[in-house]
Image (tube, rainbow, N blue to C red):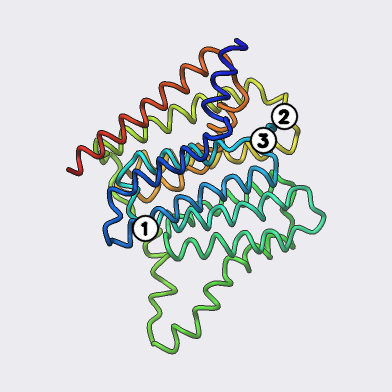
Amino acid sequence: MHAARLIQQTIVTGRYSLSVAILFALAAWSFHLSGDTSYLRGLACCLLIGFLLLWIDRSYTIIRERTKVETILYLLTGACFLPLHAWNWGMVAAVFLLFALYPLMRSFKKNYPQKDLFESFVMLSIGGLFFPKLLLLIPLFFLGASQFLALNLKSLIAAILGFMFPYWMLIPYAIYVQDYSLLTAPFEQLVVFEPIGGSFESEHLILFIMLSVLFFVSTLHYISTSHEDKMRTRVYLSFIIMMGVFLLTYTALQPADAVNMFPLIGIPICLMGAHYFTLTGNRASLTMTIVYLLAFLALFLFTLWKTL
């Protein structure tokens, strides 16, 4: 078991693992960097999201050992799945989701959490302007605030005001151009759904299964070892698990949104996956590490073949 843990830690959390992941991402994106700025923006978003995940983990000690695995997993997911190389609105929403998570987590057990919830819902609302489906997370954020013992009448009002703030800023511009669709379009798109029962494209289905299995295994590991984490960490991870379940369920029901949802799904799944790969060291986890590295490589080759 000691040897298995040593090998796994060398592969996953070694000194050069993140550098290798970044170089691989750059190499993978180089297939598209031929003058199309959407791919360059996609690469920039993927790198930014990866390092924001690291920022949140280091700020709140979500994983009790220092690690960069969440960033490595996110970069590998983006690099190996070629449909995610092009910039899309889901990437922008993922950036704002992380900016919203930071103050929400900061509100944990605060006596005066109004400022944190205001900032969190401002970020969530701005993200919803770019990708309206992000607003479906609003009830989950209120539930998270309640879990963090930060929800009271004042903080509830602050959250509502924070959500409304970006729209207040848009009202003068909408009046000036006489176009109020800026204010109504996000809510119109929010309630537009495809019929349930649609099918994934083959490569989308492969990635969805890979992420779902990783999330399921990581969640089971966390449940069995949660007593080893601090109480605050357990609350954070419980909220991350709820977010992962919601995003996976929505994507399963609305596969037409899969490409835009994958950048969002990657946030809870990479955090939970990092928790699993960092804190385990037996033969089973080593086997899973190797299997997932091979699966990512196979996914990259498959999606590359489909684009040729």
Look at 36% across and 27% down and name the residue there: 295
The residue lying furthest to the top in this view is 1
Going by the numbered disc 3, the residue's amino acid type is Arg
Q: Which sits in the foreground, 238 or 52?
A: 52
Q: Can residue 105 be seen from the camera position used here?
A: yes
First of labels 3, 1 by sequence position: 1
Quarter of the figure with the C terminus: top left
Mark 3 = which residue? 66
Rendered location of residue 84, percent (x, y): 35, 48
233 left or right, relative to 122: right
* Residue 67 image position (x, y, % from top left): 62, 35
Question: Marks 2 and 3, Cα distance to the nearest angstrom?
Answer: 14 Å
Taking the image as drawn, is residue 244 in sight? no
Where's residue 246, x and y in %? 48, 41
C-alpha span from label 3 to label 1: 30 Å
Q: Please give the residue where the numbered disc 1 appears in the rendered image.
A: 40
**Name of the residue lying farthest toward the bottom:** 176
Residue 180 in percent (x, y) is at 40, 79
Q: Classify mark 3: residues with Cα within 10 Å, few (<14), some (14-19) or many (20+).
A: few
**Which amino acid type is shown beneath numbered disc 1?**
Leu
As displayed, is residue 172 above or below residue 38? below
Q: Which mark is residue 229?
A: 2
Q: Real-space Cα distance between discs 1 and 2?
A: 39 Å
Left or right, residue 166 beside residue 83: right
Residue 239: quadrant of the picture: top right
Task: Label 1: state its secondary structure.
Answer: helix
